[in-house]
Amino acid sequence: MKDELDILREVGSIAASHGSIALSEILGKKINLLLPSVDIVTSAGISARIDVAKAGIAVISRFASGLKGESVFLLDEHNAFKLVGLSCKIDGEYKNLDVLTEVGLSAIKEIGNIVTSAYLSAIGMILKKVVLALPPTLISGTFDEILNIIVSSSENDGYALLIEAVFEEPQEKIRGGFYLVLAQSAATDIQDACKRILAEIAK
């Protein structure tokens, strides 16, 4: 029997399909975006689910319409370098990167924006709303510092959807996280939409 998380996994599959096409076009190579897992936790519980001591980069986008909240695309340093390497591959070889340049940071921001847009488009389908985000911002530091910045600047005290993001290319696999930090009202809207879909399936 399907439950709410099953519906959200299907939303992830739709988003991954759209994101794969967009990423492949942007990077000029076949990229598979996978969103294999999803979970719902309280906003305060995010830190218990990740290694807060790791350093990394986050692409943060506040929602402009359709939902109250923000999205966070998070990569640790190792996977950030690997992801930029995908966009810097020359003659079949990955470039060895020792530092993230402005071009590399722009690539991460653009890729984070693609993942965010794909998921918000998919979640908008079940909500029957247009869900749009403002232009993204990029911050770096330890995951603990990044989460503190998000929590301190956020008006949301509801829930977070925690989604694993995996980028696959024939020679590489990159893992990151994609989170929707939602106000209580937004979390309720998504749960209600899932319940309506489940009720239709049960008929």
Image: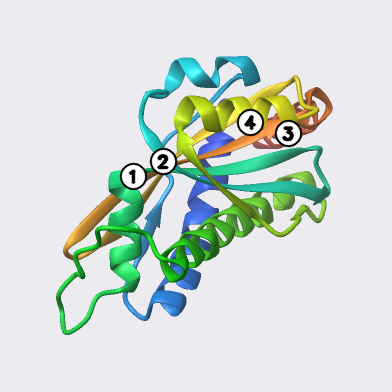
Pointers 2 and 3 in contact (CB under 8 A)? no
Which residue type carries mark 4? Ile
Which residue type carries mark 2? Gly
Q: Residue at x 83, y 47 (%)?
A: 66
Which residue is identified by label 2? 56
The kind of secondary structure element at disc 3 is helix
Where 197 falls versus 151 (above or below)? below
Pointers 3 and 1 in contact (CB under 8 A)? no
Q: Earlier in the sequence, mark 2 or mark 4?
A: 2
CA distance separating discs 3 and 4 = 25 Å
Pointers 2 and 1 in contact (CB under 8 A)? yes
Which residue type carries mark 3? Ile
Q: How is the image coloured?
A: rainbow
In this rendered view, identify the residue nearer to me: 189 or 71: 71
CA distance separating discs 2 and 1 = 5 Å
Q: Can you tell which of label 3 and label 1 is closer to the viewer?
A: 1
The kind of secondary structure element at disc 1 is helix
Horizontal arrangement in the rendering, residue 127 relative to residue 103 (left or right): right
Which residue is identified by label 1? 77
Q: Can you tell which of label 2 and label 3 is closer to the viewer?
A: 2
The percent coordinates of residue 3 (x first, y second) are: 57, 25
Pointers 2 and 4 in contact (CB under 8 A)? no
Which residue is identified by label 4? 149
Q: Earlier in the sequence, mark 2 or mark 3?
A: 2
Q: Earlier in the sequence, mark 2 or mark 1?
A: 2
Q: Earlier in the sequence, mark 3 or mark 4?
A: 4
Q: Residue at x 42, y 23 (%)?
A: 52
Which residue type carries mark 1? Glu
Which residue is identified by label 3? 190
Q: Earlier in the sequence, mark 1 or mark 4?
A: 1
